[in-house]
Image (tube, rainbow, N blue to C red):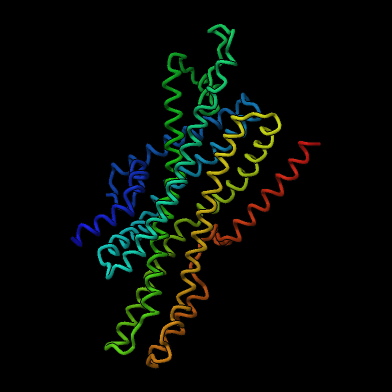
Amino acid sequence: MASERWKEDIAYAMTPFKLMVWPIGVWPLQVYNFYSLLRSVLGICWTGIAVILPIIELYMGCTNAEQNVDCLMLTCCGTLGILKIIWFRIYANNLTNNYNSALNDYLTIENMEERATMRKHAFIGRIIFCPLMCFSYFSCIMYALTPFMDYDEKNQNITNEDIVLEYPFPSRCSIEYFHAPTSMYKILVIIEAFAMIVMASANAGNDALFLNITLHICGQVKILRTHFVKFDVTRPQVYDRFNALIQRHIYLIRLARELADTINFILLIQLFFITILLCIMGFQFLIALKIRDTAMMTQSVMVQTAFLIQLMMYTFIGNYLKLQMEEIAFSIYQSAWYDFPAKIMKNIIFIFMQTESPVTFQAGNFITVNLSTLVSILKTSFSYLSVLRIMIET
């Protein structure tokens, strides 16, 4: 019965994320062999389509202002997706250590209270996963369908020779440059739509994978806090039991630092891209609002929502991890610390010193990713958009 229970818990906590990132070769518990590398290479190639074609389109100057924004957005998202696949392969050991630790945690659950805490954090991981992926995929669908919403209107009363072919993302001149036959139009549309879906999995799917294991670490820190609060000095082997808690604390800090090191560079690039794209897509929304272009407004809102969800998830969970690490000291204070032996009292001082500099997510080792970062980015973006709105109206 216990065996079936932990299998169910592991499946509940990890299966959705495995289904999302295994096809692109970054699932931490996979066998890292030639086939996993091949999946990663194919994922990079598919995502690269959404980067290379828009760049060629911009270079050839065949796009209007709206399409230029789309090209820039696709290039940034595709670059992030490729970067995450490569980075999660480079730092595969860090992610593997964390996910193997999570497996071991589910196998060694001591009581139902701890199981409930772990299930709660796994549920939060699913709550993050669903809207993040839904908005990402819905944005891809909108980009795939938008060119066809007014296709008939644009091409009515036009001969077959003069029909302008539209694609899921701006790539008409690029495809013409490679002399792709018109008979392959539907195949090319399917290829581009699939490339956008792979790009969404490489970008948002990897975010969901990373944030899920971060939440698990937060849950383990919360369980450790409970052990500190309930520490019983009247039971035998006081020093050994307290030392085991200290070792667990050190182990969780090491796992959290591995995650922070893995995401460090990616967060720097992601914050840079998201800040720029929020302003550009917001400007596109203001223009669409002025000319009453419903399709463009919907498209802009969905893309901005996907970016904001990505940003909010990292800031909220980064802030949550920091708070959990800091609360270790308060949990010890809530225990019967005044009855501890003198030898243990000396160790408590070092724990307090450690909680003064908790593990945090940082972008490039100089920008702490927390709620203050989110507020700062939003304030800057809205200030910029307010100025642009005044310029448009005047």
Q: Residue at x 62, y 44 (%)?
A: 278
User: Which residue is at the far right?
Assistant: 394
Q: Residue at x 47, y 78 (%)?
A: 329
Quarter where residue 38 is shown: top left
Find residue 96 and report its horizontal and vertical position in percent. 33, 57
| Quarter containing the N terminus | bottom left
Quarter where residue 173 is shown: top right
Number of on-image labels: 0
| Quarter containing the C terminus | top right
Find residue 378 and report its horizontal and vertical position in percent. 64, 52
Left or right of 222 in this view: 15 = left
Tell me: residue 121, above or below residue 78.
below
Q: Residue at x 34, y 81 (%)?
A: 243
Residues 103 and 26: in front is 103
User: Which residue is at the far left?
Assistant: 1
Quarter where residue 158 is shown: top right
Q: Residue at x 38, y 90 (%)?
A: 340
Tell me: residue 100, above or below residue 342.
above
Left or right of 181 in this view: 237 = left
Find residue 146 and report its horizontal and vertical position in percent. 54, 27
Find residue 150 and report its horizontal and vertical position in percent. 57, 20
Tell me: residue 231, above or below residue 324.
below
Tell me: residue 50, above or below residue 177.
below
